Image (spheres, grey):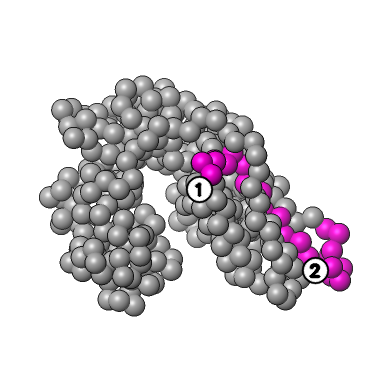
Amino acid sequence: MHTIGLLDCNNFFVSCERLFRPDLLHRPVVVLSSNDGCVIARSNEAKALGIPMGIPYFHVKDICATEKIVVFSSNGALYRDISRRVMHIVAALGTQYEVYSIDEAFFTVPTDVCTKTLVRRIRDTVWTAVGVPVSIGIASTKTIAKYANTMAKNADDIGVLDDAAWYVAMSSCSCGALWGGGGRTAATLRTHGIHTAADIQQRGIGTMRVVLGIIGERLYLELTGSVVDPVGAPHEDIEQQSVTSSRSFAQVTTKRSELRSAVGYHTVRLAEKMRARGKVAGKVLVRITPGRHDREYDAVYAASALMAYATNDTRNLLKTALALCAEVYTPGVRYKKRVSP
């Protein structure tokens, strides 16, 4: 029997930049996406100043200057290199592990070891060997481990939820705070009077299956301690073949919300296609084309990002695609076609 851990590098891109600028410790820092389009990482100090994630940089440029926020352009090669160093430490545990994103990894914890001693050793080793602060959540399933990791960020960077502790925490754990439970999922659950993890447990697997289908069933099982998504081996090979989803809007649009919705829809479809074909993606490209009669028709509105590790996980791809969508969006342009390989 094993429990599952989730290691998450704190404010990862900012932490990477601070490795070479120790004078920036405790100072507000933000990191921008490629082409300096939008904010993709913030230090705790920048968060406290009200800098939102994903906001276009030109919206907060004056605030950054006034508050003396240090601004960095994204350095993907550096972040991937430091990520590999962190993941090598996780791999050295000798247990099963799975890289989830550039700054997160799941790993198994044998029950014959002292859990808190092990996670403290991992946390301290990463800090000593790499210089990046991490938080670690431990629980019986990935979904609960994700929540435990969130709790860890408000403690000493370690959160352990055994069955008894999780039973107590369920009543205060909102559905929106659950891995895969945000946005529309949480809204759907609220319409059925389901607000917390405890409500999900009380309603039972049958109700969750009716409300959310297979997603609801899996969520119920994970929250009640049944491992639906076990920790797997990390993906190493980047698939070169591209998969594309492209379609025009019925009418041109200038609305950011419509573009986000469209890009999100196509990203979900692409992830399903890749899983069905046994493929993984090493790069995500979002390209949005203005209408043929628009004065901006010849302009290129596109951005791409290399994934730290090839994946077909919907959540990881969606996070990247929506960040790229925010980067390429320009107010006032009348968009007609979106492409999301």
- Which comes sooner in the sequence, label 1 or label 2? 1
Pick the front one: 111 or 45? 111
Q: Is the C-beta separation of discs 1 and 2 under 8 Å?
A: no
Query: Residue tagged by mark 1?
Result: 276
Taking the image as drawn, is residue 128 in sight?
no
In the rendered image, residue 95, in percent from the top left (x then y), is placed at 31, 27
Q: Quadrant of the N terminus?
A: top left
Residue for point 43% across, 66% down: 183
Place residue 133 in its image quadrant: top left
Taking the image as drawn, is residue 334 in sight?
yes
- SS assignment at label 2: loop
* Magenta stretch encompasses residue 261: no
Compared with 235, 193 (above or below) is: below
Residue 125 relative to residue 85: left or right: left
Residue for point 37% across, 28% down: 90
* Magenta stretch encompasses residue 283: yes
Disc 2 crowd rating (10 Å Cα; few below 14, some 14-19, many 20+) is many
Pick the front one: 28 or 116? 116
Going by the numbered disc 2, the residue's amino acid type is: Gly
In the rendered image, residue 91, in percent from the top left (x then y), is placed at 38, 25
Going by the numbered disc 1, the residue's amino acid type is: Ala
The image's mark for residue 291 is 2
Compared with 300, 191 (above or below) is: below
In the rendered image, residue 134, in percent from the top left (x then y), is placed at 38, 37
Place residue 181 in its image quadrant: bottom left
Residue 2 relative to residue 305: left or right: left
Q: Which residues are magenta?
A: 277-299
Residue for point 30% across, 76% down: 192
- Foreground mark, 1 or 2? 1
Distance CA(mark 1)–CA(mark 2):
33 Å
